[in-house]
Amino acid sequence: MQTYTKVEAIKRINLLANSQKPFVCIINYKQDCSFIEEVCHIDPATLLYSVNGHSNYSIPSGKEQKKNICWQSQPIPFTAYKHSFDIVHKNILLGNSFLTNLTCRTPISTDLNLKDLFIYSKAPYKVWLKDELVCFSPEIFIRINKGKIHSYPMKGTIDATLPDAKEQLLNDPKEMAEHATITDLIRNDLSIVAEQVSVSRYRYVETIQTNHGPILQTSTEISGQLPPDYGSHLGEILFKLLPAGSITGAPKPKTVEIIAEAEDYERGFYSGIVGYFDGENFDSAVMIRFIEQKDGKLFFKSGGGVTSQSNAKNEYLEMIQKVYVPIY
């Protein structure tokens, strides 16, 4: 598939959206590399996608749903994680950031290949790029429907099997502060491209199934009204909102600098977005729950938000908890 620079991607998205031609876009974290292709020209031998019901694949005959898989992960040592955490935490205490999303790369091994992980996983947003990556994301980036834009930042995770898990999650001071910060950030982001921005639902809890058991996560819905000609400017709208606030932090520009200093690897397409335009409306997801293939090895990329109230050990355990596939 052809890749596009940021300037080229904006122009191509604007052209396709203004022409009401359905397309799929995949944009990396740094926004300097994008795949953008009309749906009718996508080769399923190279790219498979499932974006909230829009898909170019079906489970092959004879392949029943798989429930038990071989899965092993080798998380980085806590000392290595704490080195990155300390860089982030120091900047937060200095007032350079209120919230920073710190991520890591975890080597994994499994009896499934990338394509099988795509086929068997259960998630509202999935994408497979041959020999490169697979993503099964639960987190919406933005949805545009009849000129109204919605965002659903997801912050806050807990093991659903713990006693009173929902109450623990909703009443945790660190999680409350983190969620309030990201809600304010996304509300400000949407205000750049839309009017009448407001919070529709705040900190609602969802259950997500994983191969390790269920977890709970909290999300918030924020919405606004786009101008009537938004279709001819969809490219600018997307890139003004990127990178996604939920996987960076606040304030965004300085926090992105802190992330570059603290993380010792390239995110690539991890924490970028995958989107689908149906000719009128747009739906997209933040590319979290992400596996990359490099030099024949598999790496799971995951992380979490760090605030002034964060504890390094707890954040490390949350990062590990997110190394899962939704196959059950």
Image: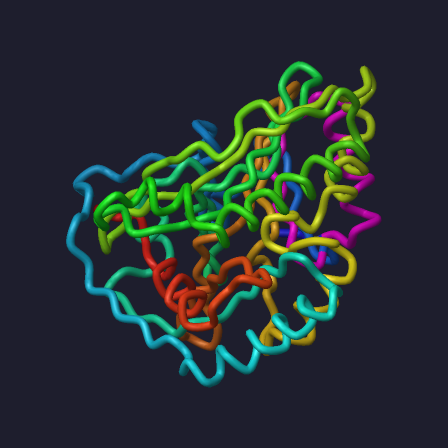
- The x and y percentages for residue 237 are 77, 35
Q: Nearer the viewer, residue 255 or 12?
A: 255
Please name the residue shown 43% across and 54% down the image: 289
Left or right of 154, for residue 114: left
Left or right of 126, for residue 42: right
The magenta stretch spans which residues? 4-30
- The x and y percentages for residue 239 are 76, 44
Q: Nearer the viewer, residue 53 or 263?
A: 263
Left or right of 4, for residue 262: left
Residue 31: tell me if it is visible.
yes
Please name the residue shown 55% across and 74% down the image: 85
Say whether residue 189 is magenta. no
Looking at the picture, the colour scheme in use is rainbow
Residue 120: tell me if it is visible.
no
Q: Hey, which quadrant is residue 182 in on the image? A: top right
Q: Hey, which quadrant is residue 280 in on the image? A: top right
- The x and y percentages for residue 286 are 55, 46
Q: Nearer the viewer, residue 298 or 181?
A: 181
